[in-house]
Image (cartoon, rainbow, N blue to C red):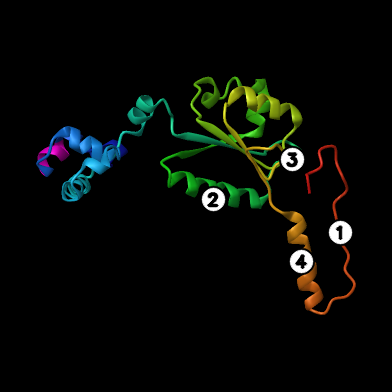
């Protein structure tokens, strides 16, 4: 017999279910699960609610919570995939994995957005932009200048990660000068005395390094 996904996922317990099992009011359950008024809660009561939630397999409705807080809990990560660079540099995916792990710890989820999606029709056909689904955007690596201005129109909050853009706020870069100095130091300590630096030829959109 074939089991469908619908048959394998059981409905989540409600706050009323937790309140009955823990012997408290629904309001108390709400305070505990939403981490509100914790200073007013008895530690024993809090632990009883959390234990009941775990036993019943409670899963918070993030969509409903987002509507209440006016947040979608989604952050877009823009990565390159243009014809000149069809395969994003492998290091980018280490950034993406790190971003995803960090966001999960704060309750947010990662949505990958391709550079070509923004370049095509100004991103107007991308569902996350059409539906204003993103609370913010993280841009990884260099992007064309016209895309920079467009992202500012599509998303209110944006962080530039290791990009060819530098502003006073919301920009994060590696200290490549320091990394280069350490590399030379280690090579010198290993006994090398003649060093050569090989760089690719400059293109129309050189990376900041």
Name the quadrant containing residue 144.
top right
Q: Mark 2 to mark 3: distance in Å?
A: 20 Å
Q: Mark 2 to mark 4: distance in Å?
A: 24 Å
Name the quadrant containing residue 193.
bottom right
Q: Mark 3 to mark 1: distance in Å?
A: 21 Å
Near mark 4 (Cα within 10 A), the count class, few <14, some 14-19 or many ≥20, is: few
Q: Residue furthest front?
A: 39
Of pointers 3 and 1, the one earlier in the residue sequence = 3
Q: Looking at this view, is 41 or 2 the one in front?
A: 41
Q: Mark 2 to mark 1: distance in Å?
A: 29 Å
Q: Looking at this view, is 11 or 14 the one in front?
A: 14
Q: Is residue 12 left or right of residue 141?
A: left
Near mark 1 (Cα within 10 A), the count class, few <14, some 14-19 or many ≥20, is: few
- Name the residue that disc number 4 marks: 183
The answer to whether residue 19 is magenta is yes
- Name the residue that disc number 2 marks: 98
Q: Which residues are magenta?
A: 17-21
Q: Secondary structure at mark 2?
A: helix
Near mark 3 (Cα within 10 A), the count class, few <14, some 14-19 or many ≥20, is: some
Of pointers 2 and 4, the one earlier in the residue sequence = 2
Q: Is residue 125 left or right of residue 107?
A: right
Q: Looking at this view, is 127 or 191 the one in front?
A: 191
Q: Secondary structure at mark 1?
A: loop
Q: Are marks 2 and 3 in contact (CB under 8 Å)?
A: no
Residue at the image position 73 percent from the left and 60 percent from the top = 179
Q: Choose mark 1 or mark 4, whichever is in front.
A: 4
């Amino acid at each position: 017999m074939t089991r469908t996904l619908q048959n394998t996922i059981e409905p989540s317990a409600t706050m009323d279910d937790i309140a009955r099992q823990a012997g408290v009011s629904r309001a108390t359950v709400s305070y505990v699960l939403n981490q509100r008024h914790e200073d007013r809660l008895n530690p024993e009561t809090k632990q009883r609610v959390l234990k009941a939630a775990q036993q019943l397999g409670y899963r918070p409705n993030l969509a409903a919570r987002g509507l209440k807080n006016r947040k979608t809990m989604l952050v877009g990560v823009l990565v390159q995939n243009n014809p000149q660079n069809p395969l994003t540099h492998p290091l980018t995916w280490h950034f993406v994995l790190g971003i995803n792990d960090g966001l999960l710890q704060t309750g947010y989820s990662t949505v990958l957005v391709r550079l070509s999606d923004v370049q095509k029709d100004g991103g107007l056909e991308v569902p996350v932009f059409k539906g204003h689904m993103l609370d913010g955007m993280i841009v990884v690596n260099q992007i064309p200048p016209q895309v920079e201005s467009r992202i500012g129109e599509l998303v209110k909050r944006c962080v530039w990660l290791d990009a060819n853009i530098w502003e006073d706020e919301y920009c994060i870069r590696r200290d490549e000068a320091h990394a280069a100095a350490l590399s030379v130091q280690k090579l010198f300590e290993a006994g090398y005395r003649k060093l050569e630096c090989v760089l690719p030829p400059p293109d129309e959109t050189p990376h900041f390094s």
